[in-house]
Image (cartoon, helix red, strand yellow):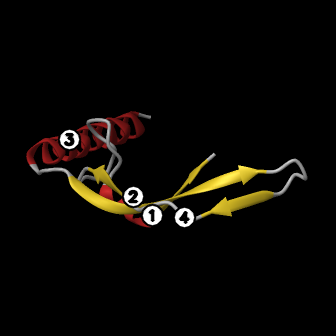
Amino acid sequence: MRLVRRALLYLLAATAVIYAADYLAARTYPLGSVDVQPFYAIHLKSKRTEFDFDVPPESKPCVQSLAPHLGYEPCWYVKRHTSEPIE
């Protein structure tokens, strides 16, 4: 039982150190940006959805970190989700 508590304490401490280092990196490095292609998802009365891709691409700011910080999503996540629906 004592070994489990110690292992849990070490895991919690390691998680806190990694998150703090990630936050420090997010504060230190400048924000990045990724081009995102938004599109309109128009719901019709016939329960179908029509898509309109005639929208200019936008530049979405992101932070160079593992987790979201400072109100921005991480760049690795934004790069994998480059199309954004507008309901």
Amino acid type at image mark 3: Tyr
Pinpoint residue 5: horizontal percent, then vertical percent.
38, 34
Q: Residue at x 40, y 58 (%)?
A: 77
Residue beneath label 4, please? Answer: 54
Q: CA distance from mark 3 to mark 2?
A: 18 Å
Q: CA distance from mark 2 to mark 4?
A: 21 Å
Apparent side of residue 63 relative to residue 3 in the rendered image (left or right)? left
Pinpoint residue 32: horizontal percent, then vertical percent.
22, 56
- Choose the circle earlier in sequence order: 3 or 4: 3
Amino acid type at image mark 2: Val
Apparent side of residue 44 relative to residue 39 in the rendered image (left or right)? right
Q: Determine whether label 2 and label 1 are within 8 Å by CB.
A: yes
Dot label at residue 82: 1
Q: Determine whether label 3 and label 1 are within 8 Å by CB.
A: no
Give the mark count: 4
Give residue 27's quadrant in the image: top left
For this rendering, which residue is in front, 35 or 24? Answer: 35
Q: Residues within 10 Å of mark 3 (few under 14, many from 20)?
A: some
Dot label at residue 23: 3
Q: Residues within 10 Å of mark 4 (few under 14, many from 20)?
A: few
Residue beneath label 2, please? Answer: 78
Point out the image quarter for the N terminus. top left
- Choose the circle earlier in sequence order: 2 or 4: 4
Q: CA distance from mark 2 to mark 1?
A: 6 Å
Pinpoint residue 87: horizontal percent, then vertical percent.
63, 45
Q: Determine whether label 4 and label 1 are within 8 Å by CB.
A: no
- Choose the circle earlier in sequence order: 4 or 1: 4
Q: Residues within 10 Å of mark 1 (few under 14, many from 20)?
A: some
- Choose the circle earlier in sequence order: 3 or 1: 3
- Choose the circle earlier in sequence order: 3 or 2: 3
Give residue 56's quadrant in the image: bottom left
